[in-house]
Image (cartoon, rainbow, N blue to C red):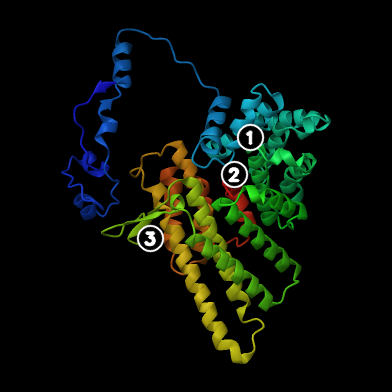
Amino acid sequence: MVYNGQPSKACLHCRRRKLRCDLRKEACSQCVRAKLVCSGYRDPKQVIFRDETWSTEQRALKQGPVPQPLSITIDDQARNAFYAYHVSGSAKTFDVLALVHNQDPSDERLNASIDAVSLAFFNKFYLNSMTCGAWDKYQHAIRLLEISLRSNHLITEDSTLLSVLLLDLVEKMNNDDPLSAKGWMSHINGALALFKLRKTERCQDSVGLRLAARLSTNLKISCMFSGSPLPPDLIQLRSDIEPLMKGDPKWQVSGLVVKYGQLRSALQEGSLSSSDIVTRATNIDYELLLLTKMMPASWLYRTKNLPEASDRTLEQHYTIHPNTAVNQTWNLIRTLRIFLNDTIREHLLAETASLDKLFSSTSSDVSTKTINSLAKEICASVPQYTTLRPSNQAMFTIETLRCHTVIFPLYIAGLYGSSTSEWVIKQLKYISDEVGVRVARDAADMLEKRQDRNLNLVFARLGSYAFASC
């Protein structure tokens, strides 16, 4: 590392164009005039030293051949990618994996499941294919797991339950048809059966609690998008660990997702009148709204206003959330409320007496305005991830993965919003072409052609299950 002198505080645009940056609080004048989203100003202390590795390598090459660096196997790349997002990254959807793996790093069956899910994840979101090697690792992990399931001792171990949850993720990444209930529900039902064999006290420690919460999340999402009813055992599981999860916003949202899932099941059965449907949907929507008003300070997002409109923003502002998990949770709330308000307006006029038509029409208009407002909020959450790099410059892989988390909510915003569809399609194409998230192009095509309104299939085809947080 070489001392670099006192570096400039200027924003990225001004540094690249060698322009004088006035460091204005909201956005510098140069970016405002160019109608660009200002990247913000860097901390000189962070860049006071320059990495001279490349230039040193070039000087060494002129002096003669040098030893070649060790190659990194695709298995190691895959595991690093999976850990970077799911275990140690800001999402931490499988942070329990580090705790369980540290109990016995040599656990063959857990390591086999980790290899299988890592390679499947890497292939789907980096290579866009499922290689023979990935399928072989999956089959090997299944065989080892079957041995564990025949052992009275191993069948209740943390690593066994976690292995099943990991293989459930593999299965769903390779099966884009959630209506194939056997494929989507086999592993998660097996995980629930294993959980019921464990003693209650196993849920009281940190590892047991996190495994239970992960199982709850995966089970309810699997049921909702496969059209399967939520099993009573899920409700019992949540009831058992509820006292230990109080105050966690993700858990609170998760509980309302369960209520919405129960409403969907009732709708499929046709067991409710239109007035009952409206009442239940309105109550869940109100609980979600109330939850947003009671979020702790660490879960609040801030709004960045722009002097002028930008191609990367729907309006002259965008929101910045503390981390990926928080952004996902807020967008889950917004998406659920869109679904609920769409259900409300659909059933409002179905069984209403003629004297109440005016009231119902007014209430339907309120639901439509709510949907449009929520769609715009989803759109405002996207530039946080798409304005980090200039056009035609690839984003870092972890940033690419974060963009995956906004694809399905963005699709919903374009599908239901009255004035967002055109902007959403452009952003999805941008995310595909400039950021490198290939499924964003699929979402844009489906939205543009309005060819598939089956949200269960859309959710699966976009690989959204792999990024579900609560």
Residue at image mark 2: 466
Local SS, label 2: helix
Asked if labels 2 and 3 touch by Cβ distance under 8 angstroms, the answer is: no
Seen from the viewer's position, the closer of residues 459 and 306 is 306
Could you say which quadrant of the image residue 141 lies in?
Answer: top right
Alpha carbon of mark 3 to alpha carbon of mark 1: how far?
36 Å
Could you say which quadrant of the image residue 316 lies in?
Answer: bottom left
The label shown at residue 117 is 1
**Dot 1 alpha-carbon crowd within 10 angstroms: few under 14, some 14 to 19, many 20 or more:** many
Q: Residue at x 43, y 58 (%)?
A: 379
Q: Residue at x 44, y 13 (%)?
A: 68
In the image, residue 11 above or below residue 50: below
Asked if labels 1 and 2 touch by Cβ distance under 8 angstroms, the answer is: no
In the image, residue 335 above or below residue 386: below
Image-based side of 287 in relation to 264, left or right: left
Which one is earlier in the sequence, the residue at label 2 or at label 1? 1
Image-based side of 386 in relation to 229, left or right: left
Q: Amino acid at mark 1?
A: Val
Q: Residue at x 80, y 33 (%)?
A: 149
Which one is earlier in the sequence, the residue at label 3 or at label 1? 1
Give x and y (percent) for residue 32: 23, 54
In the image, residue 7 above or below residue 469: above
Seen from the viewer's position, the closer of residues 437 and 364 is 364
**Dot 3 alpha-carbon crowd within 10 angstroms: few under 14, some 14 to 19, many 20 or more:** many
Q: Quadrant of the N terminus?
A: top left
Give x and y (percent) for residue 86: 55, 38
Q: Amino acid at mark 3?
A: Leu
Image-based side of 39 in relation to 179, left or right: left
Whether residue 219 is visible to the viewer of this picture, yes or no, is yes
Residue at image mark 3: 314
Q: Amino acid at mark 2?
A: Ala
